[in-house]
Amino acid sequence: MVCSSVMADSNHKPIGDDIKNVPIFDAHIHYKEPAWGPYPPEAVIKLMDKTGVAMALVSSTPDQGTIKLWKYAPNRVVPELRPYKKGAGSSDWMKAEGMIDYLNERLDSYPHEGLGEFHVHYIDPDDIPMLRAVAKMAVERDIPIHVHSGAAPVEMFFEFEPELTIIWAHAGMSEPARVVMRMMNKYPKMYADTSYREDEILYNGKITAAWRKIIEKHYLRLMVGSDTWVNDQWDDYEYLIGLNREWLSHFPREIAERIAYKNAEELFDRKISMDQIGTR
Ligand SMILES: [Zn+2]
């Protein structure tokens, strides 16, 4: 199997405290309406500055939040189109009337570089035409979809469109590590963000064995994320980014930098560095 030259050197030491100087790409930010008051765009960018988050993948309910943040700091935001709006939430967006037109219209009007993050809680056969259309749209526009679901919907999307790029939100959230490994092995065009997985990756100060295997094998397709889905997450933003730096510090520089920001650089064709901190 593919093993990088880094791993061949078993003495390769962890990056340790130097992780503090590595910029972060936060692959899972939401800028939802309840955050706009307590966390105006300048406050969000200040939080990113304070934590060394150079850039972020942002999706919001409604999408206006993403556009607001992107307009304020276009060099810090990769906008992503979330289908949620009035009358279209996480459990029924695929049933909302006019959804395909809405998505096309937003994608034509703004430079979104992904579709999501959206949920597929379970596969309702009635939703399949819509899900198939979303997958097709993403391939035609050459953008990834960012899916919060178990393994089954991801498999379904790849059956619809084998050329699709998928970012698996939270690496499947509640899917066990062995399923994450199986999925990463099976789908070379699948990335995963590790938001909400931090305590599983680093447990009692140690990287857990199952996650170490996933990370050492698939570090070219993992990204970190905060998931600011409620304001509590914004309140805890410094802690959350610190938590991610902490687990990354246990890996060699090449792996840590890849997951911290270099995979995102490649995926979204950006240049990411600490020079972006304090700018917009
Ligand atoms: Zn989310």
Image (cartoon, rainbow, N blue to C red):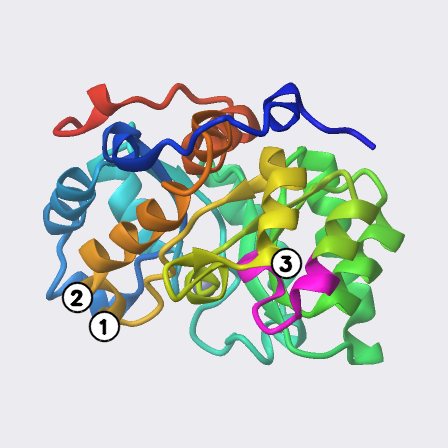
Q: Which residue is mark 3?
A: 210
User: Upstream in the sequence, badge 3 or badge 1?
Assistant: 3
Which element carries disc 1, helix, strand or loop? helix
Q: Which residue is mark 1?
A: 232
Q: Position of residue 256 (x, y in %)?
A: 44, 34
Residue 175 lies within the magenta run: yes
From the viewer's perspective, is residue 265 above or below residue 73? above
Q: Are marks 2 and 1 in contact (CB under 8 Å)?
A: yes
Q: Position of residue 239 (x, y in %)?
A: 22, 59
Q: Answer with the quarter of the image where residue 24 lies.
A: top left
Query: Does the rendering let one see residue 102?
Result: no
Position of 178 with respect to 58 (left or right) is right
Query: Which label lies toward us, 3 or 2?
Result: 3
What residue sits 54% from the left and 55% below the top? Answer: 116
Q: Identity of the amino acid at label 2?
A: Asp
Query: Does the rendering let one see residue 75?
Result: yes
Residue located farthest toward the front when viewing the structure as drawn:
11
What span is colored magenta in the figure? 169-180
Pick the front one: 57 or 11: 11
Pick the front one: 129 or 215: 215
